[in-house]
């Protein structure tokens, strides 16, 4: 696979580390898939639970290991998983689909919890219009306590990918998004593809 040069957005966001990130992030997720597939084949179950749980854990571990030596990288533990902060941005992986669909179809399972709170707190300012209907606002819920470990001014870069056991990583993009409360869809302010490593 030829080296993918960083885009202007990646260069602006990450500076000189963008060159390393555009190569390392895809390789990390490919290794996470390999580990999860090998685990599933090892347990020989009829369901794909081992693959799904393995991929969830391995995505964090592979990104943390692959990015630990990047200049300025800092590791932070969130809900028992290690995430990496680079250039004042949290890099957070999300497998948004098990089939080959566009990242614009990405949707969270829950409107609350660590992931949702992370996006609300560290994602971009909302571009959604708000309506004042004169109704009393529902009380705000408490944000996940682990987010107190992150400075409030950090940005968030979502690493969103579609992946399954049979085909591996089919789509991989990164960018910034906000969370639409009513249906849990991500509204992307910016997203762009990363090159997927070959088999």
Image: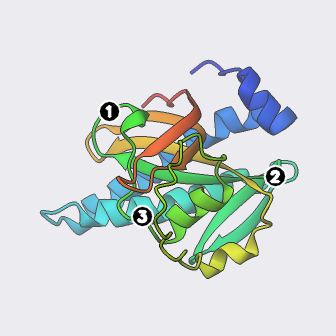
Q: Is residue 114 above or below residue 98?
A: below
- In percent of width and height, residue 98 lies at 29, 45
Name the image quarter holding the C terminus.
top left
- Report the Cα–Cα distance between label 2 and label 3: 25 Å
Identify the residue at image location x=58%, y=77%: 144
Mark 2 secondary-structure assignment: loop
Name the image quarter holding the N terminus.
top right
Q: Residue furthest front?
A: 134
CB within 8 Å, label 3 to label 1: no
Instruction: Tell me if residue 104 can be seen.
Output: yes
Please name the residue that numbered disc 1 is placed on: 101
| Quarter-of-image position of residue 92 | bottom right
**Of labels 3 and 1, the one closer to you:** 3
- Packing grade of label 3 (10 A; few <14, some 14-19, many >=20) is some
Q: Residue furthest left?
A: 46
Mark 3 secondary-structure assignment: loop
Please name the residue that numbered disc 2 is placed on: 88
Please name the residue that numbered disc 3 is placed on: 111
- Packing grade of label 1 (10 A; few <14, some 14-19, many >=20) is some
In primary-sequence order, the first of circles 2 and 1 is: 2
């Amino acid at each position: 696979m030829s080296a993918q040069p960083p885009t202007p957005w990646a260069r602006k966001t990450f500076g000189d580390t963008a060159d390393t990130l555009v190569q390392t992030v895809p390789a990390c997720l490919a290794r996470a898939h390999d580990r999860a597939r090998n685990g599933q084949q090892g347990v020989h179950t009829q369901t794909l639970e081992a693959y799904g749980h393995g991929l969830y854990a391995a995505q964090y571990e592979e990104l943390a290991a692959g990015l630990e030596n990047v200049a300025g990288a800092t590791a932070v533990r969130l809900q028992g998983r290690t995430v990496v902060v680079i250039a004042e941005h949290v890099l957070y992986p999300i497998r948004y689909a098990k089939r080959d669909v566009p990242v614009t179809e990405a949707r969270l399972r829950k409107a609350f919890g660590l992931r949702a709170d992370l996006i609300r707190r560290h994602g971009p300012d909302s571009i959604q219009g708000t309506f004042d209907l004169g109704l009393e606002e529902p009380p705000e819920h408490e944000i996940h306590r682990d987010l107190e470990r992150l400075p409030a001014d950090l940005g968030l870069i979502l690493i969103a990918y579609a992946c399954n056991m049979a085909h591996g990583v089919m789509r991989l993009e990164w960018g910034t998004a906000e969370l639409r409360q009513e249906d849990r869809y991500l509204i992307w302010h910016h997203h762009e593809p990363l090159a997927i490593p070959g088999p």
